[in-house]
């Protein structure tokens, strides 16, 4: 299904009905409204102007649209900030982050939590049972603009309470963090500071707990809203629109309180801005399509975050916020929409109905231009709507053949303590993901501790802290598991395990990492596997084990070990190696491989196979010769897709 | 005429008379003194020591020199700052910018305006009618060191008043800025903050008004001084010494209160520091001369700012403030001086008489060395003085054949909202200017709204906000006008015009820009014009029009339109294209073209044609074979110039 | 002799005795303990827990180890910071540098000086005469993490007093700094601010005095500790462990109060992080050894700082703090140790006994792994211990043939006022040093004013401020002296000398530098010497002199002058030129040259010649054919060394 984001408060009331009519005509089902509208709902403290929103909902609903109502907590109005300046967050350098844009609040501000509770309650009471309100969106893009962590007095207060609850006694904290080192010991929780602005790096255990705390504060703020909405608005779904790769809080945990994970898909900006890193050549080649794995990565990630998921904001044309903002190539908006559906999206909602000619996002295209004419994206959306009608219902998505264990905490651990400048968790996950996609394998992202039964192949790019619960799922798993470097290398308190890495994983992998090293680009050491040499770099481990190595470094040391169904990579793998190695494993497991030409990617949904062509040239569809095509045919046009039925 | 900047307070009184005598001997007419001397005029609050300045003026005047007296407001003394710390400016990060160098004040400090008024009044009363005082310089290099904008409480206070005066009601401001977006609405002017330190970008309309306000504060501060000087010092001229490209305030507007625009010409430092951007190869090639267009650009700009203009500070040797500070090649100081005269300078004044061996500028060469011996620049200045005597009077400068419409506000608009990282107004103007200069065309810079009658060709690199008054001048202009991209793309309040860009210009150009995009370097798209393909990049527009395109993009869309005498470029043009396109236009208009060899530039003054050789090799002068040379001859030596009479 | 750094407080008491036994078994003599242990010595204000330290010292001493006891002042505990937040330093941007790592104090905090005095006194009283305590280490790595200079109220207070003591009257200061420039004059010392956070650069003389002041504050803080230790702990030596190149304070002056200069040798991190600059190719080539001159440079520097010197911390494996942290190549820990001994180290002490699995340095290898097993470095240290036993005693180090005059103040002068971005004192010293080492010459670093009699060749890379005392030593010196550019170019108050550079040196060098220039990379000008052209860049001087130039620039100006035994380079020399020029001089002086193959370096100690092979391939030892080898032989294996007796 399709939807759109709409801001009735931006447009004359006289136009609402026609806008609604045209949305329906276009084939849209959902319309998201209300986020950011606080100053119009409560222009003065305690004075509410519900009438316009009443009318907007009525108008949209009457036209046959289902309304997703946003809570406006991402943009508290100026009068509220002036009453309570301690709502504002403080950045890592100690500067207050002021009013004048959005997301200007700290999750730990007590006043703000109360104010957010107040406005959400009022909204939920008024519209919670409205027949046209189908669901709710909480806030907007948690964590965007680096807003997960704040360093002010309210944050310090809450962090100390959080530590007290976690450790019980200050002695326990001192022990857990190793504070005897450098005389960092505290005598009470009231002595603990935030970890920013130390002379040199703070204790990494201190940072990790602050990251955990900050992540939980986001979830708690969201949960507060969810509980109100559940109470006053039963039987409506609750969604949040997450942003592109924003690892600062644990989306798996936050989403436990939601019904649907939404995410905001801007493939061009994400490619330009290295949300997932692209080479300069890729940035040029895919400037008008986005990197062919960048939307898919997020679709798969957010499907892992919540089985029901939407694209809550789909880029419909050029945007305003990247360093460079090109127009999508012709057809690409349609292709993106179909790719989201292929990956299992329940709804794709375009952002926004109409380009707003003022303020920060005036260069952000919509389905309509600011002169009220349809823009390019409009006709592409219309085509999707027609196609959807003729193809519905799509077959349900089953589990993928491969699971990728993704861990937000791993991102934190390596950000806090990379030990080598190029050791970035995001990049390691990305190289695993791209290798699997190049093999034509569908991938499910799962958190550590998730059920692994459905998967014959599980890849764990790296999991530094292995909980007992997560270990348990691996212990009983029959499928092949490939562990990346540094897995099991840390305890819960970010120290080296007493038995050395991989610590708890030694149950599964009888080996011991006695030394690690990081190397600079240019200092590559080949890894010998399968009779060939594969370049490696960034990271290398020295392993002691009775197992025979499956691959070796140039100096003869073991680089890859296998024990029963568990494989361990003692180095940072390149994409070529992974494609070859995981390809061999997949073949031995009889997984469905679809090696793809450059710029082409495939994805299954039930027995339908979708192929997408991100390149500017026609490409052969990677389909069997006798494939029965539902859309397109054996030649895949540029910026287009096809669907065939799996044999 | 020639002059020099002198600081008698730096040198023993015993030496003043001899210095004065040698200045006259050298052939200098003017001597600028007094700027920066506050701590010597008022060493303690209210205690004045005029005697030394009385004597200095007397000594210099007696020697036959005309004195330009500077107001010392760029350097308030420490005791004043200690009495009133709120004089100090605050930077964008919220840090107070302290005492200890210069320009340590905010233009919005009420106390400082009063103190500046006080000292200027006292100076004007004492010396306003002094026979040796020929004129006044206000302050020093407004805006230098990023001092136009300040972010402290005094600035906030003044900005709120300015907004109130501009908008009358807060509702009008909210509407103008589109503050409904992201709930940015205010209930009173007292709620408006400065636009710095927001969580993500502030409203661009908010920024633009803050830029406008800040620009006007500079002009108001200057006007306050001018009014005092006019009152107490009738019949003396008033000048300010502007810096190299400092777009933060509108020089056209400020200069309305002046008689003369001075500017400070440091071609080597400007080239090294990208005051106008130079390639690495150009920085090496022109390290000892400066880029051949960099001084000329400023001469033409400041002649546009005010018909009477001086080079108030002419670099006489190596300076101290660039990343690299090489010595000018032999002869280049003379060449720079003559180039300024060729462009119409009334006076060229060297900075400074003698290198001061202490403090921040001790590595800044003067005409004399710190050991009191003449430095290299001295003999070059002496040669100019002799040449001037034999060649005077120079013929008057008439209007150039080409006008370039230059707009400070355009710089602000694109700095605030570039939409593509490489879209920098300065760079666009620079490429137009260099193309015209390569054709040997003289250029007049004019502000929007200026009389255009004299010009057969007008280029407008970009003019986003077109006022009704400016439009009027174009409406009636008969000459050819070439509009660059994004012209007319914004309303006065920085929003997209209701009829889409080019908004008001649609009166002249019946077309509509329906989409724009910015692209990264490397993603070039050729523009087809005149049977050839020209590389383009940075910026592209999609145009709807009934006009037939004069040039097309690779995808067939129109890239260049013409309606009657108006031409519109829907892309960011390269220099090669502009040279070819403007050259063809100029030819069709019968303008005097002088295509020049590399490193050579020409400039007319009346019927004299000057040619300057910035290259290290002799070059043929681009003169007709039968040219009558006043200086030099058909072969232009390295770092030299020639003059011939136009046929 | 060998030693190790140990933190008993990190490990169970039960393990101390065994650790001590194994240390002795390994062949270690010294063990450093106690630094950083404040929170364990005084867990609450005034409550002391000496018992553990009593026991630790006893245990270690009983095992036969000599204890070096550290004062714990680098890490004041949290309760002390909370009682007196003004202990904390303030960074150049005005931000307080908080608790949570180490070195969190300002040297100018009065409270902290008292508190440091208190804890050091208590320690000295308790352990000063302990039979197992052989010596003391003050604090830890002064200046590390940019902690020499602080910009808070306590620093300002102390700086004003320091200025008052230095200048006596504010008029004298104003004159010395040239404060008439830009009206920077003060009326009292109470008006002087710190030089940070000015609008543009502060007066360089202001900065230089602040650098000098800051340097003296470090020395004063150390002296305070030394005086206590001398009083309560007679006959024990006092050492401090300096860091890699940390020029912010004058080590020569501070070390006057010490018995021994220690330094902390981390060749891999120093190479990776440009502590001395290495090309990208060198960083790759020497990633596992460190640059072959980088440890040696420091050995020679710190031997100059104090004739008795230790390596107090020797890297034993990968570290945690560089951008990249590779493992040393096999054998390199042994090679480093022997290289330190060859350069005259009295003791080499490994850091640390055992890798601590928690907190900031958990990735820093020790001689033992965190699982209590020996790490790679352990066996290499053991081998050194055995070798030492068979080779002791080593012959004493005599003076080297060449002295390099090294001046901390020179580093400050050029950092404050580089005048060309690439003019970095460190880099200039480094190029001189590398040239001498490539010739196989041993080098002694000496401060200006040191006795020069022993040296037939003295090189002075640059000495901008030449004191009368330093001049005196040169005046009477018979050996050859090579002066680098900018020598003598400044007075004590950082102004240009009245007679122009080289100022006071004009007694020795009858010449006058009339102009200087800095040039960008790419603008190289060849210097012609000895019939060849040598590339030069960065810096060039114009010299007036009656002396005939020994080398000339491309434009014919003199580049190199000689007067009697003094040589003056009027340009920034490249390494090739220096090797050739200094080589010719050395040859003429009959100094012992040992030109070395790539990656090989030599060093004499008495009549023993050591050669070290930093390359990964065997190399011929640069020994005479009939050399008598004490260790190794004519072929030098990779990462190994040999010793032969000089003929």
Image (cartoon, coloured by chain):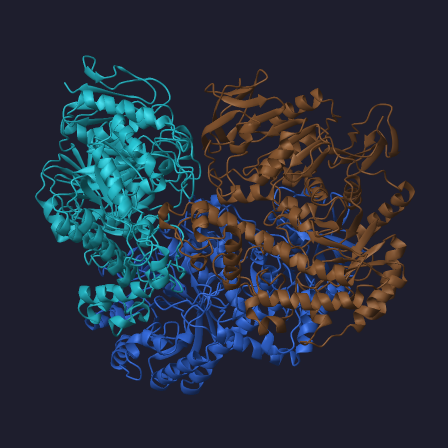
Chain colours: A brown, B blue, C cyan
Q: Is residue C615 above or below residue C88?
A: above
Residue at x-position 43% and y-position 84%: B228
Foreground residue, A396 or B158?
A396
Q: Residue furthest top?
A: C626
Count the numbered circles shown.
0
Q: Nearer the viewer, residue B535 or C300?
A: C300
Nearest the eye: C635 or B342: C635
Task: Tell me, yes or no, if residue A40 can be seen here.
Answer: yes
Q: Residue at x 52, y 23 (%)?
A: A559
Q: Quadrant of the C terminus of chain B?
A: bottom right
Location of residue B388 in the rendering, given as x and y in whole percent from the top left corner: 38, 64
Q: Position of residue B586 (x, y in %)?
A: 65, 55
Q: Is residue B446 visible?
A: no
Q: Residue furthest right?
A: A390
Left/right placement of residue C347 relative to residue B597 reads left
**Figure check: C29 above or below B640:** above
Q: In the shown orientation, is residue B528 left or right of residue B246?
A: right
Residue sitting at x 58%, y 60%: B415
Rendered location of residue A434, percent (x, y): 66, 33
Which quarter of the picture shows residue A18? bottom right
Which of the 4 image quadrants contains residue C214? Answer: bottom left
Quadrant placement of the N terminus of chain B: bottom left
Above or below residue A177? Residue C104 is: below
Residue B476 on image: x %, y %: 72, 70
């Amino acid at each position: 299904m399709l939807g759109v984001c709409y801001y009735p408060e931006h447009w004359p009331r006289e136009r609402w009905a026609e806008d609604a009519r045209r949305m329906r005509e276009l084939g849209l089902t959902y319309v998201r409204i209300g986020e950011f509208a606080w100053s119009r709902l409560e222009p003065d403290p305690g004075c509410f102007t519900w009438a316009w929103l009443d009318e907007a909902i009525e108008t949209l609903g009457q036209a046959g649209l289902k309304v997703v109502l946003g809570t406006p907590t991402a943009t508290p109005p100026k009068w509220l900030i002036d009453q309570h300046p301690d709502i504002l967050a403080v950045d890592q350098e100690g500067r207050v982050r002021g009013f004048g844009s959005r997301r200007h609040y700290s999750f730990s501000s007590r006043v703000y939590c109360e104010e957010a509770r107040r406005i959400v309650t009022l909204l939920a009471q008024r519209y919670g049972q409205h027949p046209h309100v189908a669901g709710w969106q909480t806030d907007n893009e948690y964590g965007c603009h680096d807003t997960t962590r704040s360093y002010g007095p309210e944050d310090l207060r809450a962090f100390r309470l959080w530590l007290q609850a976690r450790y019980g006694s200050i002695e326990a904290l001192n022990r857990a963090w190793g504070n005897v080192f450098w005389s960092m010991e505290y005598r009470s929780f009231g002595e603990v500071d935030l970890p920013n602005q130390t002379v040199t790096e703070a204790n990494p255990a201190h940072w990790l707990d602050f990251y955990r705390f900050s992540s939980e504060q986001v979830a708690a703020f969201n949960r507060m809203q969810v509980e109100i909405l559940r109470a006053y608005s039963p039987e409506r779904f609750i969604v949040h629109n997450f942003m592109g790769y924003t690892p600062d809080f644990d989306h798996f945990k936050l989403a436990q309180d939601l019904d649907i994970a939404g995410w905001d898909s801007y493939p061009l900006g994400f490619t330009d801005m290295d949300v997932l890193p692209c080479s300069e050549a890729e940035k040029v080649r895919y400037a008008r399509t986005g990197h062919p794995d960048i939307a898919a990565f997020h679709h798969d990630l957010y499907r892992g975050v919540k089985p029901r998921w939407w694209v809550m904001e789909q880029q419909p044309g050029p945007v305003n916020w990247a360093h460079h903002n090109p127009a999508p190539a012709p057809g690409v908006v349609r292709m993106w929409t179909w790719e989201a559906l292929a990956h299992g999206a329940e709804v794709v909602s375009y952002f926004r109905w109409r380009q707003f000619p003022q303020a920060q996002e005036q260069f952000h295209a919509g389905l309509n231009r600011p002169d009220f004419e349809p823009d390019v994206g409009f006709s592409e959306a219309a085509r999707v709507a027609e196609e959807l009608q003729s193809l519905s219902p799509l077959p349900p998505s089953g589990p993928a053949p491969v699971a990728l264990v993704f861990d937000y905490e791993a991102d934190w651990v390596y950000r806090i303590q990379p030990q080598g400048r190029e050791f970035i968790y995001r990049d390691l996950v990305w190289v695993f993901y791209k290798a699997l996609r190049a093999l034509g394998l569908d991938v499910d992202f799962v958190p550590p501790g998730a059920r692994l039964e459905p998967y014959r192949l599980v890849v764990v790019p790296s999991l530094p802290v292995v909980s007992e619960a997560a270990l348990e799922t691996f212990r009983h798993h029959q499928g092949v598991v490939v562990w990346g470097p540094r897995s099991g290398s840390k305890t819960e308190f970010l120290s080296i395990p007493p038995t050395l890495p991989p610590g708890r994983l030694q149950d599964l992998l009888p080996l011991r990492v006695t030394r690690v090293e990081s190397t600079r680009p240019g200092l590559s050491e080949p890894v010998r596997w399968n009779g060939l040499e594969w370049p490696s770099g960034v990271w290398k481990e020295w392993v002691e084990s009775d197992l025979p190595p499956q691959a070796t470094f140039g100096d003869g040391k073991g680089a890859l070990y296998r024990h029963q169904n568990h494989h361990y990579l003692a180095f940072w793998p390149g994409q070529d190696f992974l494609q070859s190695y995981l390809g061999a494993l997949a073949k031995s497991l009889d997984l469905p491989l679809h090696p793809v030409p450059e710029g082409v990617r495939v994805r299954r949904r039930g027995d339908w196979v979708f192929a997408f062509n991100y390149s500017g040239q026609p490409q052969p569809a990677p389909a069997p010769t006798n494939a029965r095509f539902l859309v397109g045919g054996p030649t895949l046009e540029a910026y287009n897709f096809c669907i065939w039925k799996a044999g």
